[in-house]
Image (spheres, rainbow, N blue to C red):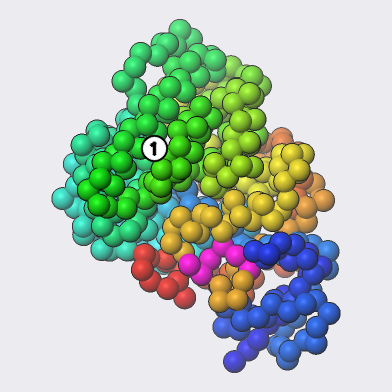
Amino acid sequence: MSQQLFSSQRVITPEGEGPACVVVRAGKIVDILPFDAPRPPAEQHHDFGDRVLMPGLVDSHVHINEPGRTDWEGFDTATHAAAAGGITSLVDMPLNCIPVTISAAAFAAKQAVLAGKLWVDAGFWGGATADNLAELPGLLAAGVLGVKSFTIDSGIDEFQSVNQAQLTQAMRHLALRGLPHLVHAELDHSPAEAMTSSTSYKGFLSSRPARWENDAVALVIRVMQQLVSEGLTPRAHIVHLSSAEALPMIRAARAEGLLLSCETCPHYLVLAAETIPDGQAAYKCCPPIREQSNQELLWQGLSDGSIDCIVSDHSPCTPDLKNLDSGDIENAWGGISGLQFGLSLIWTAARQRGMSLADLATLMASRPAELCGLRDKGAIAIGKQADFCVFGPEQTYTISAEIIQHRHKVSPYLGHHLNGVVHSTWLAGELIYSTEAGPNFPGPARGRVLLAERESR
């Protein structure tokens, strides 16, 4: 059986960063040796010198929109972008595809379009909506990694939001299977300021206040407490946390033993409301990008463990839906496109705050893998799949439309000058992206479908 060696002076393992040689056989890590130890026989030896060998990232929050809205994005372009960003596994969201992934039949329709399009491994979230609760057992049995619900209008008519009773019923199904229930946590039950100018970012921010998030997080906690009183062990996860005001109640919920986790996203950590110009709808997302003071509290939440992971929430659409010409923020589609650039965006900001690449490997690889139940992903450790990102942390580049791999070259990050370059990405020991001479994406597409309760390879 063929054997490969991957060595570097800077290998990031769960124990930290240091020189090592990683031994790979049949796509799995079988040993990790000291760098200067005698090398076992191998057909290939890849020595990356001073470049960092870190685990392939796991992005558990990606809207790919196929089938049905492939003019927004698709599996081929999205997974190219993922590979170029050092991501080796992603999890697709149950909307904005057609049909939305709220039944076993819809999940089968999605799997039917994947052939030849996955350049990285892909798992899938299902949806729990007001009108699909009878479908949940079949959907969960089909292999989704968990489900997502909205407590506010999703923006898609066929993906209905849930009230407290429906959220409780759905989370009960998830708890019985030990799967996570992801929640878009906003509640618009309290008045907010109406936008007086459709192009004002400050007006948009005031129209979706932090208390909407805070109230929805409190709702999720109440539902979890009710299910615990029934003898169940629910797992809930707050997606794209924007409001740092919710962190104290999340910490308190954990202190009482609730399995509540949360994520945030690069746009909340590197963009701030004070610097967003009016009439620039590329910055619109829900919940919104908030003020610098809030952003600093999110970084503190990452440092103290209150926030579990960083994921992209890549949510693209066609350029016309972003109202780029009119600058109409109020009526533009809400979503940030940035799947390819998360590692560099976060590293550029994190290094200024004293965080290490080992910290980022935890936040962007191992913890997202744990959330999704992907036991052989997210770390350079014996028994894990040989998924790697080779990263040059001291190098710099500027984001331009020419280098964007996702379908539409629209992003609020255009022109940003970043630290850290992804030099290559490896999936199960096979090169899937490289900046060196030759094709950037040596084929064929090698990604595989990741289903719950099934080994990925």
Tally of marks? 1
Left or right of residue 36: residue 450: left
Residue 176: x, y in percent? 26, 57
Residue 285: x, y in percent? 49, 31
Answer with the quarter of the image where residue 220 lies.
top left
Q: Main secondary structure of the magenta part?
A: loop
Left or right of residue 281: residue 211: left
Q: Which amino acid does label 1 sit on?
A: His
Left or right of residue 178: residue 386: right
The magenta segment: 375-380
User: What kind of element bears circle 1?
Assistant: strand
In front of the other: 12 or 43? 12
In front of the other: 81 or 151? 151
- Is residue 136 covered in magenta? no
Residue at 40 percent of width and 24 percent of height? 212
Residue 74 seen in the current view: no
Vertical position of residue 402 compared to residue 179: above or below: above
Answer with the quarter of the image where residue 112 lies.
bottom left
The outermost residue toward the top is 196
In front of the other: 270 or 338? 270
Vertical position of residue 282 compared to residue 359: above or below: above
Residue at 71 percent of width and 53 percent of height? 357
State the residue position of label 1. Answer: 184
